[in-house]
Image: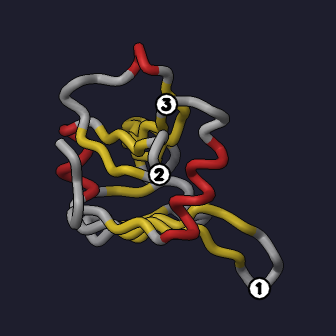
Amino acid sequence: MKLTTEIKITDVAKNYLSSISNGATGLRLSIRGGKGCGGNEYDLKPLTESEIDAGDDFISLNETCNLYIPPMDMIKLFGTEIDYIEDDLGNRRIHISNPNETGKCGCGKSVTF
């Protein structure tokens, strides 16, 4: 199902995500359990056409690239905002602001729900 308002992605983040797809059909955003001290990590990886699951929800990043999300993970991502930011030290990264998180580890890489 095409998502329109359930997850917000800034234009800067859309451009960045499209650029890292390296010509793939899209990217999959999922939540990997059993990772890090928080127990879960966000996982973002490029997908080929054959790896796309027909049941995945998706957000259009541009005319040729989509961000795919497994339905089971969509429950935990509802209301999330995704941005591409640069901090005061010049570090650039994807920033995921998820209201469904109940905690983050000290380094911010793993989360709890």
Farthest-out residue, top: 50
Q: Reading the chain from its start, which is encountered first: label 1 or label 3?
A: 3
Q: Which residue is located at x 25 percent, y 34 percent?
A: 56
Q: Which residue is located at x 49 percent, y 30 percent?
A: 25
Spatial separation of the CA atoms under disc 1 and disc 2: 29 Å
Q: Label 1 amino acid?
A: Asp
Residue on which the image places disc 3: 25
Residue 15 picture quarter: bottom right
Q: Reading the chain from its start, which is encountered first: label 1 or label 2?
A: 2
Which of the two discs, 1 and 3, sits closer to the camera?
3
| Disc 3 residue crowd, few under 14, some 14–19, many 20+, Cα 10 Å | some
Please say if the residues under marks 1 and 3 sit with CB atoms less than 8 Å apart.
no
Spatial separation of the CA atoms under disc 1 and disc 3: 33 Å
Residue on which the image places disc 1: 88
Considering the image in quadrants, where does the N terminus appear?
top left
Residue 57 image point, x, y percent? 24, 41
Which of the two discs, 1 and 2, sits closer to the camera?
2
Q: Label 3 amino acid?
A: Thr
Q: 42 left or right of 80?
A: right
